[in-house]
Image (spheres, rainbow, N blue to C red):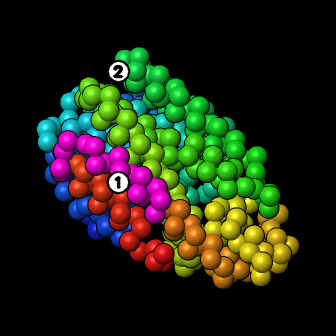
Amino acid sequence: MTRPRATSPGGAPSWLIYCGNVNPHERLQLPLVERDLERLEALLAESVVVGDPYLDAVTTHLIYAGGKRLRPMLAIAAATFGEREASEEDLLGGISLELMHLASLYHDDVMDEADVRRNVDSVNARYGNLVAIVAGDYLMARSAGIAADLGTDVAGLMARTLAWLTRGQVSEVRTAFSVERTEADYFEAIEGKTGSLMAASCRVGAITADHDPAHTEALSEFGRCFGMVYQLRDDILDVIAVDNELGKPAGQDLAEGIYNLPTLYALRDPLVGDELRSILGAVLNDADRERARKLVVATDGVERTVAAAQRFLALAQESLATLPSDGLRQGFGSLIESLLEDLPAH
C-alpha cells in the first residue's frame, strides 16, 4: 500500500517539526542527521508492513500521520555525532525506539479515550479500542524483534525501558485525581514515561556506534535530562497556553486528573491551595477546568517548574561537556535550550 509522504502545513517533511518555536535541525546544525532521518522515514513503515491490508492500515496509521521523530533523531545524532552517514544498525536502533513510542501512543489514547492524534483520528477512534490495543502490542513486538536483531545489549536496554515506561504509566494512573500526589510521584511518572525513552534513544545510538563506556553514560544522561525538560515544558504549557494552541484545551491535564508539577505547587500555596483543592479530585467541566487553571497560574507554580527544568538543563550541559564532538555538544545543547526559550523567565 502506497501513501504520500506526510508533510507539515508548510510542505516540509513530517519529521521537521518544532521544539519550542524552532526547527530542531536548525538547532542541531547536523545536516547528515537530517538526511539520515529521510532514510529512516522510508524504512519506518516498511518495518511494520506484513501484507495484510487491514493490519497494515492500522499499524501505519500514525506513521503516515507524521510526528516529531525526536527519538530516532537523538539516536542517530548520538551514534554518528553528525560526522558520518548512519549505518543500517544506527537506523534500525532509531526505528526500534520510534515503534516503542508509537505503541505507547496507541495504548495511551485508549486509556485517555482520545479522539485525535497528530491531527488525524486516533487509532482507537477509527478502529476501536480492542484493535488499538492489539495493534499497539504488535508495534511493541516489532520494536523488540528489531532490538533483538541488534544484539543482547540493545535488546536488554529496550526491555528495561519498557519496564520503566510501564512503571511510569502505573504511577500516573495510581495518583490520578489525587490532590495528595507528591513531587516524588510526579517525577517517577515523567521519568518513566518520557525520560527513560529519551535516555534509551541516546544510549541505543551509543551502542550501535560502539562508543566507549564513558561517552555512552554521558549520552544516556543527556537523553534522560532532555526528556525531563521536554515533559516539564509540556506540563507548563498545559496551564499557560491559550485554548487549542497545543491542539487541546488549556488545562486538559487538570480536567483528566493528571496533576502536574505546577498544579502540585499550587495545591500547597497558602492563598489559593484550599480553593484549588476544593475544585479538584474529579473530572472537571469546562468552567471548573478554566477556574482551576487560573488558580494555578496565579501562584508561583509555573515559575518553580521552570526552575526545576533549569536544573535538569544544567545536568544535561554537564554531561555534554565530556563528549569529544564539538558539533554534537553545540547541537544537543542548543536543542535542549530551545525547549525553555519561550517559557516565563525564572
Could you say where residue 176 lies in the image, as x and y percent from the top left?
Answer: 75, 54
User: What main secondary structure does the magenta stretch of the protein show?
Assistant: helix
Q: Tag 2's secondary structure? A: loop
149 or 208: nearer the eye?
A: 208
Q: Amino acid at mark 1?
A: Gln
305 or 30: nearer the eye?
A: 305
Could you say where residue 288 lies in the image, as x and y percent from the top left?
Answer: 77, 77
Which residue is rendered at x = 28% and y = 40% of the image? 78
Query: Going by the picture, which residue comes out furthest to the left?
Result: 84
Q: Where is 306 relative to 177, above or below?
A: below
Instruction: Give me the C-alpha separation between circle 2 and circle 1.
Output: 30 Å
Where on the picture, by quarter, is residue 72? top left
200 or 122: nearer the eye?
A: 200
The answer to whether residue 198 is left or right of residue 260 is: left
* The residue stretch that appears in magenta: 310-327
Q: Where is 50 relative to 115, above or below?
A: above
Query: Going by the picture, which residue comes out furthest to the right?
Result: 278
For marks 2 and 1 on the same chain, the one whose residue lies earlier in the sequence: 2
Q: Which mark is residue 317?
A: 1
- Write down the residue under mark 2: 150
Which residue is rendered at x = 15% and y = 37% of the image? 85
Q: Amino acid at mark 2?
A: Leu
Where on the picture, by quarter, is residue 153? top left
Is residue 243 part of the magenta span, yes or no?
A: no
Which residue is rendered at x = 53% and y = 28% of the image? 160
241 or 230: nearer the eye?
A: 230
Q: Where is 68 relative to 277, above or below?
A: above
